[in-house]
Image: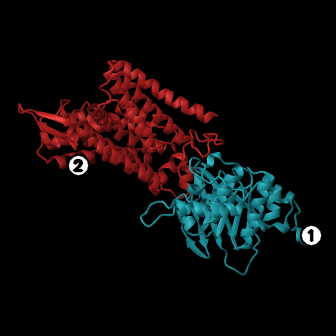
Amino acid sequence: MTSLQSSATPLVEMRGISKHFGGIQAVRDVSIDLYPGEVVGILGHNGAGKSCLMRMLSGAMTPSAGEIYLDGEKIEIATPTAARKHGIETIYQNLALANHLDAPANLFLGRELKTRFGNLDDKRMFREAREVLQRLNPNFKNLGDPVAQMSGGQRQVIAIARAIHFNVRALIMDEPTAALGPSETEMVAELVQKLRDEGIGIFLVSHDMHDVFRLCDRVMVMNNGRNVGSHRISDVTQDDILSLIIKGSLPEGWRPRGAAA
Amino acid sequence: MRVFGAGDGTAGLFPREGLGMPVKADMLHRISALVTLIGLIVAFAFLNSAFLTPNNAMSVLLQTAVIGLLGIGLTVVILTGGIDLSVGSVLALSGTVAGLLVKAGLPVPLGMGGGLIVGTLCGMVNGLVITRLRIAPFIATLGMMMIARGLALQLTGASPVSQLGQEFGLLGNGALFRIVETQANGLPRMVFPGIPFPAILLLAVALFAAYVLKRRQFGRHIYAVGSNEEAARLSGVNVECTKLAAYAISGFLAGLAGIVLMSRLVTAQPNEGVMYELDAIAAAVIGGASLMGGVGSISGTMIGAFIIGILRNGLNMAGVSAFIQQIVIGCVVIGAVYIDQLRNRR
């Protein structure tokens, strides 16, 4: 395991995380950290435990064992609301949108703005939603439609907007480009870089090698619930990563890319 | 930011070009239901001159109040993607409990309050069985349907509780602005029947429910849970609490409908309300609610309840037998849903 920034405290640190469902061990003793302004790719084949690990950080699941630290302080993340209170936001692979609600209702779901009398402040939510959505995609016009009627790209924009609108510090992106066309993928890539520049830490769960090598500073590969390798992206090649994903180990005689040169 | 209905959620995009303004699918459903309702009223008015009299209008209001109250509760439950089959039995249990308490010497308001509490408790039990024991709403409320009916029959020995006093009948039989004059022979004659209390109650409950569903966070969460439960949970919505509250509301309104109905009869009938849950579901569905959850509205359900009420009343006046009425209403339910699907498929 290589550590990048020795200077600062990690933004997020997961230590010795395990999760089992009955007799099935989904995640085994995984430790990983994330620094501010860093993109860490989480890789592995389907069922390797990537999503499970991330769900424990986003509050959708609680770990069977292990600890989570934020700014060096131990925190409990029992619910999605708790994670969001700590500034940990998630963009789920299936986007987790309520199809019958419109864009602002989805963006503010669970954190609705209210008027003084406790009524929903739909006007303000609409205004704020339009602002953030059109910043991400200037062509976003039909905010008031139920999201079921929107394109995959628009739905993705809503899911992203929901994650970054509320003081995000650590962002989990689960396969953010899997269902997108080329121009929308480009939009997401630019956004990742922009958020990183703003000092936000990002866990990027992805199958797309191109995205991983373009966007990530480090990668962690999971195999059968274990962390089988954390590396700087500059140290490894695509073949190294594939070997880790498939076999769970690096090719024989492997040396860091930088050292070999 | 409104909440829109679009059938199964994948379609429902009604062509807007040329209409000049956006028309949403659920809006359209309600408009077509409203047109149907007006058409029925016009048709029955032509068929029978007594149909459009104030007296008859008031009796339709009175008859629809019970189904309307149950329908509001069911709309809330159906919006979460659930169903409540127990409302007819809970109505009977709440009404008989209220009757028994009054019979035992409690003041009428307290006795009726007891009935409401029993109804709410039944709803909460439904909610707990569904959220804690993770039993499907259909099964959980089917069980409660039998339990509540059995309790009502057991408590009363299956016989009606009568002689409850005039005060017990006030809620169901009283009216606002009723004008009664005493005739020369000393007998009272009703000049204007007034607006029945049950109708006023229905209006108040409908307005409040619509407000909560559209303007409060709880209402938004009801729609969200029915639309995508997992998304709602991940967004920090307390799905269990929301569902529990929905069933408690349905139980409370079943209790309210129960005391209204028993008050109207001035007798607590443990056999009342059989199959009422189906009328209430029909009202919600005719009004555009989707049993898949996430789609529906109080205004739609009210229109649906009045379509059923007017059909019953008008067919009665036209001398159509109760059996034929059932057949007609059954066809209306299927037709309403079919037309909705047709529109959404485009």
| Image chain in red | B
- For label 2, the SS is helix
Side of B100 relative to A176 (left or right): left
**Can residue B147 be seen in the rendering of this structure?**
no
Q: Quadrant of residue A58?
A: bottom right
Which of the pair A119/B129 is nearer the observer? A119
Which quarter of the figure is the N terminus of chain B placed in? bottom right
Chain ID, mark 2: B
Q: Which residue is denoted by mark 1 in the rendering?
A: A260
Amino acid type of disc 2? Gly
Structural crowding at the residue carrying mark 1, measured as other residues with C-alpha within 10 Å and reported as few (<14), some (14–19) or many (≥20)? few
Which of the pair A106/B310 is nearer the observer? B310
The residue at 61%/60% (across/down) is A18
Amino acid type of disc 1? Ala
**Can residue B246 be seen in the rendering of this structure?**
yes
Q: Position of residue A41 (x, y in %)?
A: 75, 62
Q: Position of residue A186 (x, y in %)?
A: 79, 59
| Image chain in cyan | A
